[in-house]
Image: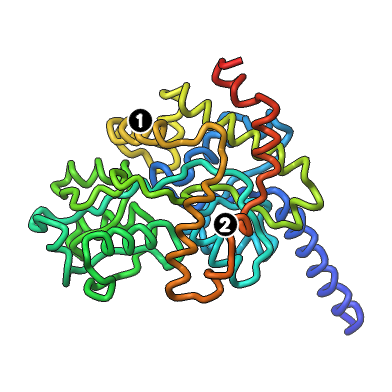
């Protein structure tokens, strides 16, 4: 083979790879957790055909944690990513040109659970905890819960494990003493002898939990597609709330077949917390910025509105689409 032909073939390979990568970059919606609530609406949108109903050729892909999801979004590997407000704020403060376009939950639905030998929140001090990577909602929830009971984060031994199923397994397997989970894992943990030490849901903390994020470039260049994603996610929330059996089966598929009673408990909790009009919580984002400002001066100069693009949820409100879904018009 001549040198020039070799160079040609190598160039052809990279051009082909780049074109495939570019095609894929417009077709993925990343879900960022395999727990029982963080990504359920994206699963429903995909599995029930609601994405397709709204003219969207989107496939779902699992990327563990919203920090990694946003990194992939910025890199151009995704069209949309699920995320939590803390990750969006951190990325935005670092210069990422992204925005939250719709929300699914606007509070922290977390529980601190641990070994039965831990009798009170004060008993967490000095213990070992399974945690998620910094910037995730689980990380924020753990830090907030500890602060509420007067325990500095440095007074626990934090071991980064990852998603909720892995964190729960670390506690039940005896590697750590406690962790932070949502409802589905709480139910599993209690069945396995763990106890709830702090119920954060009772605190009613405004917080931007699961939401959909896009680059502002995507919003500028293809607002109609973003609009259809927002409407599809709203319809998926309605489907989840009104089609329990199908939704539970979808949850079982993506959470690797957890028991029916666990899924039903998680479905009930999710149905109560899911936001019908998918409007992000500016109050929750502001409170997160206030916390971030304690360690990052950039946060004190930012506004909650810097991290959202509300045009699509505003349009949806005015259209009456959500009211029609729920039979209010």
Which residue carries the number 2 mark?
304
Relative to the observer, which residue lies in front, 211 or 160? 211
Farthest residue to the bottom: give it. 3
User: For the point 74% across and 51% down, which residue is it?
Assistant: 219
User: For the point 54% across and 50% down, which residue is it?
Assistant: 282
Residue 277 location in percent, x, y? 56, 33
User: For the point 46% across and 44% down, which residue is it?
Assistant: 106
Q: Quadrant of the N terminus?
A: bottom right
Q: Is mark 2 on a helix, strand or loop?
A: helix
Residue 76 location in percent, x, y? 70, 61
Residue 46 location in percent, x, y? 58, 36
Q: Which mark is residue 268?
A: 1
- Is residue 16 visible in the rendered image? The answer is yes
Q: In this view, does 216 lie to the left or right of 167?
A: right
Relative to the observer, which residue lies in front, 196 or 64? 196
Q: Quadrant of the C terminus?
A: top right
Relative to the observer, which residue lies in front, 19 or 191? 191
**What's the distance in space between the residues labelled 1 and 2, CA to CA?**
30 Å
Q: Which mark is residue 241?
A: none
Q: What element carries label 1?
A: helix
- Is residue 64 visible in the rendered image? The answer is no
Colour mode?
rainbow
Residue 155 location in percent, x, y? 22, 74
Relative to the observer, which residue lies in front, 286 or 143? 286
């Amino acid at each position: 083979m001549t040198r020039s032909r070799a160079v040609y073939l190598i160039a052809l390979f990279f051009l082909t790879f780049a074109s495939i990568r570019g095609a894929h970059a417009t077709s993925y919606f990343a879900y960022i957790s395999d727990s029982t609530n963080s990504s359920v609406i994206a699963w429903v949108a995909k599995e029930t055909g609601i994405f397709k109903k709204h003219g969207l050729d989107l496939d779902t892909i699992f990327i563990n944690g919203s920090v990694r999801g946003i990194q992939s979004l910025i890199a151009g590997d995704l069209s949309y990513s699920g995320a939590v407000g803390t990750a969006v704020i951190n990325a935005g403060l670092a210069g990422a040109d992204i925005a939250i376009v719709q929300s699914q939950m606007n509070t922290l639905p977390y529980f601190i659970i641990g070994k039965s030998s831990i009798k009170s929140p004060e008993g967490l001090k000095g213990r070992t905890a399974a945690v998620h990577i910094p910037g995730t909602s689980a990380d924020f929830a753990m830090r907030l819960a500890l602060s509420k009971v007067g325990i500095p984060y440095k007074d626990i031994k934090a071991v980064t494990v990852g998603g909720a199923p892995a964190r729960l397994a670390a506690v039940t397997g005896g590697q750590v003493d406690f962790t932070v989970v949502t409802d589905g894992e709480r139910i599993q943990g209690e069945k396995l002898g763990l106890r709830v030490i702090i119920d954060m849901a009772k605190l009613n903390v405004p917080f931007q939990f699961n939401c959909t994020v896009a680059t502002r470039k995507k919003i500028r260049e293809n607002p109609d597609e973003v609009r259809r994603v927002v409407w599809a996610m709203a319809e998926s929330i309605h489907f989840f709330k009104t089609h329990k059996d199908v939704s539970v089966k979808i949850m079982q598929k993506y959470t690797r077949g957890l028991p029916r009673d666990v899924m039903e408990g998680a479905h009930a909790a999710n149905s109560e917390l899911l936001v019908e009009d998918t409007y992000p919580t500016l109050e929750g984002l502001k409170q997160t910025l206030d916390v971030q400002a304690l360690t990052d001066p950039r946060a004190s100069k930012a506004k909650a509105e810097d991290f959202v693009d509300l045009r699509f949820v505003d349009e949806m409100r005015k259209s009456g689409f959500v009211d029609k879904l729920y039979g209010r018009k």
